[in-house]
Image: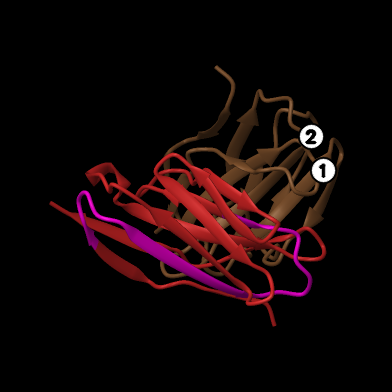
Amino acid sequence: GQNIDQPTEMTATEGAIVQINCTYQTSGFNGLFWYQQHAGEAPTFLSYNVLDGLEEKGRFSSFLSRSKGYSYLLLKELQMKDSASYLCACMDSNYQLIWGAGTKLIIKP
Amino acid sequence: DGGITQSPKYLFRKEGQNVTLSCEQNLNHDAMYWYRQDPGQGLRLIYYSQIVNDFQKGDIAEGYSVSREKKESFPLTVTSAQKNPTAFYLCASNGGGHTDTQYFGPGTRLTVL
């Protein structure tokens, strides 16, 4: 079956760096998305990776290794507003998104 | 402003009643999607539509129905046949390209009493 795994919850300190991991097993692969979702709100797009390597976008970076079925989202210089859930979603061979359950990130001052 | 709107934000219904959730977009997107989000689970696809007057079932279509009469609108009806309808419902749209990013509306939280 198809499966996306990511940690349920992580805690980090304001100003620090945190890495949120995502492993996937899907039938085919057409890219991996990361979204941010504040409680009770819509998911907002952060990044899309389809080739191996690191994509940097300001304080957020996303990494992909297709051979390992692995991605991570790296958040630098954490701010209190980064407290949210981070959703990993993989696009399979039918171009359907398979979603992980999300990682709730708690930022402490 | 361009975007996706969903209404209402909160909806309460009695068991056994059908209810329709609204989703409108003015992004000129071809494709629209409905997801359900439950605590501790990933988003699950209910229905999607890639073009007007056409739609396909997602993974959990049972107990739901949709229509796509206009490009801008993709309403979802939660019928009395849906066994556990209380959830957060999210509508999304994209340009229709296979790997195009999906953009989400603010969601509707449905509670069935």
| In this view, A82 is above or below B53 | below
Disc number at residue A15?
none
| Among the 4 quarters of the image, the one containing residue B103 | top right
- Residue B15 showing in the rendered view: no
- Residue B25's x, y, as percent? 64, 28
Q: Amino acid at mark 1?
A: Gln
**Which residue: 30% across, 67% down?**
A10
| Among the 4 quarters of the image, the one containing residue A8 | bottom left
Q: Which residue is mark 2?
A: B30
**In the image as oriented, which residue stretches furthest toward the bottom?**
A1
**Which residue: 80% across, 42% down?**
B97
Q: Is residue B18 magenta?
A: no
Q: Where's the N terminus of chain A, which quadrant? A: bottom right
Give the side of residue B49 with respect to residue B60, left or right: right
Asked whether A25 or B82 is in front, the reply is: A25
Asked whether A48 or A56 is in front, the reply is: A56
Q: Residues within 10 Å of mark 1 (few under 14, many from 20)?
A: many
Asked whether the residues under the numbered discs 2 and 1 touch, taking CB atoms below 8 Å apart as contact, a structural biologist would say yes
- Residue A16's x, y, as percent? 24, 54
Provide the residue span drawn in magenta.
A12-33
Chain in red (letter): A
